[in-house]
Amino acid sequence: MKRFEVTAAALLAGLAGYVLFEANKLRIGNFRVPQTGFFPRVLGLLLVLLTVVELVRALRQTATTRGPGKIDGEGWFRIGATLAIMLGFALVLEWLGFLLATFALMVLLLRAIEAPRWPKVLVVALVTSVLSYGLFAWLLGVPLPAGILGI
Amino acid sequence: MELLHNFALGLSVALTPMNLLFCFIGALVGTLVGVLPGLGPVGAVAFLLSITFKMEPASAIIMLAGIYYGAMYGGSTTSILVNIPGETASVVTCLDGYKMARQGRAGAALGISAFGSFIAGTVGVIGLMFLAPLLGRAALSFGPAEYFALTLTGLTLVAYLSQGSMIKALIMAVLGLLAGTVGMDPISGEERFTYGTLTLRDGFGLVPVAMGLFGIAEVLENLIVLGTQSVYETKIQGLLPNRQDWRDSAAPIARGSVLGFFLGILPGPGPVIASFVSYAMEKRLSRYPEKFGTGVIEGVAGPEAANNAATAGSFIPLLSLGIPTSAIMALFMGALMIHGIQPGPLFIAKYPELFWGFIASMYVGNAMLLVLNLPLIGIWVKLLKTPYAILFPLILLFCLIGVYSLNANVAEIVIMLAFGVIGFGLRRVGFEGAPFILAMVLGPIMETSLRQSLLISRGSFMIFLNRPICAVLIGLTVLFLLWPMVRRRKPQVT
């Protein structure tokens, strides 16, 4: 846990420094007439202070404190694949269109998360994409991208 | 008399066929969210926020409120039957509820939980009806200094009451305030931290951030160990508690209702705290405290009543002061602002139909939930057996569509995914998402009121100490910040 906490605190301290650097580019003003950069600068200073306190606390804690549960290879694969598939969905959504992109998303997610049998995957993906299209496009009137199918 | 007149006005709004339908949808979705793991009420409200754009404001708020209190009802079902709380406010129900189920008394536990929730929900709504207008009138005298002090105290109290480290919660709150500064400066209109991106010009959207931190992060966490839920196979019978059950539960329900309502008003996760405090109080007051944790009905009745009363209480600061006190209230504020409605001291006077319609719908919704929960328990149990392999892709799909449908902007999906990864990572090292989202919404209010106060006082910070309400609030803030240090030093002194 100690290693995780120290890393997190160090990363946050770095972020705090970056915030201060960026806030300094804005007009600060003074206490009488605070300007655009005033509040972000105050927050940046506060973040530096808090992250330093957290870093010291993390460094001083005993190494025996229990950390988060370990993620095995399979877990990492599921998380990585899920994120990659969703990002892919975002990239192809407008080109492929809602129906095709959703069908592909569901097929890939179902296979990546637990890999049920193909017929089940295809049926669930088909039913979900059609039903969600009906719900959002027809019932709720949300404009969805038509893509290459034109619907 | 005026109250009755107002309530009649509310009923005329809540009982229109459309609003009844939305109330029902909200209660149903809320129960589902409470029953199923993977998407809590915050994620569900964030998701449905995107489809409330085209709805009437009253219908939108009625539906979203239904999700919130519906989740409180639904969460107890999984606690009792599976020993896994559907959402955090039902954690404590596991202790005695699940034990009751193992002893063949699942029906009584589910029954008292539903009836207790109904009674407490009604008590909470009555409290809201009386207290919100009073507080709203008092808040009319608030200036920017009071608003700054109020937001500061609220955020500090949220950090103080957080389940983990206070420093971590404060860091999340500051990060949330910083996220709130992205976009146009609320006073000068200058751009900040947008790096020329059009999407960031209006700041981070509340929905993508909330869905990322609460929806995506939650699913990613569940993907680490993917298992199947084992529902305790028991025949659920006798949902109506017997006379002895009622006798044992009456006082805990009454105490839980009052306690929950007042704890709900305070900033922080009101329903969660209310349920834990109620459990501790019932144990202390009991003639047989040693039996708590072995399946006593008081351990179910009190906390379940408390968490439902707290949901009503938590609306008070938002509707009367315009200050959200939790992540979910921040989303409700967003829902109102989407329709151009600013919650605050003038809200009740300016939108009486909306306020009283909302109040009346909560009565109706509570009755609906009683009908939904008891006879449909069999269906909820069947739903619990939905394989995660199907459930999680569905939740992720709804998150993706929900965010895209806001502005038809793919960049917002990317923002949601980024916050999902950040939320997942931070959660693993003990940083909670709630202070972040609350601070992000409070940020612009806090910044504007701070800068206005300094302009008024010509740079003097004494403005925060010269005004009595401000001074009390600042004093409380200092107390909340220092108390953990004092508490830590105490054993060394003695």
Image (cartoon, coloured by chain):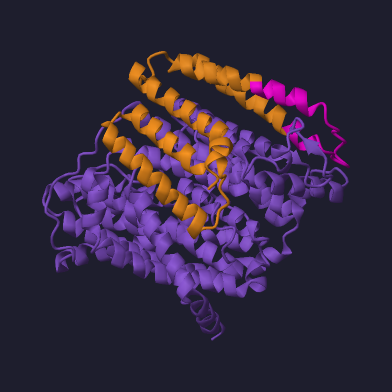
Q: Is residue B206 above or below residue B342?
A: above
Looking at the image, can residue B259 be seen?
A: no
Chain A, hue in figure: orange
Q: Is residue A51 above or below residue A129?
A: above
Q: Is residue B373 above or below residue B148?
A: below
- What residue is rendered at 52% in x and 16% in y? A6
Please provide percent x and percent y for residue B7.
51, 79
- What residue is rendered at 62% in x and 36% in y? B411
Q: Which chain is purple?
A: B
**Horizontal side of residue B429 vs B78, given as left or right:** right
Q: Nearer the viewer, residue B262 or A112?
A: A112
**Horizontal side of residue B40 vs B114, given as left or right:** right
Please provide percent x and percent y for residue B427.
46, 30
Q: Quadrant of residue B88?
A: top left
Q: Quadrant of residue B249?
A: bottom left
- What residue is rendered at 44% in x and 26% in y? B428
- What residue is rendered at 53% in x and 62% in y? B61
Q: Give the residue furthest to the front.
A: A149
Q: Quadrant of residue A1?
A: top left
**Horizontal side of residue B133 vs A46, given as left or right:** left
Which stretch is magenta? Answer: A15-42
Please provide percent x and percent y for residue B473.
64, 50
Q: Nearer the viewer, residue B238 or B247?
A: B238
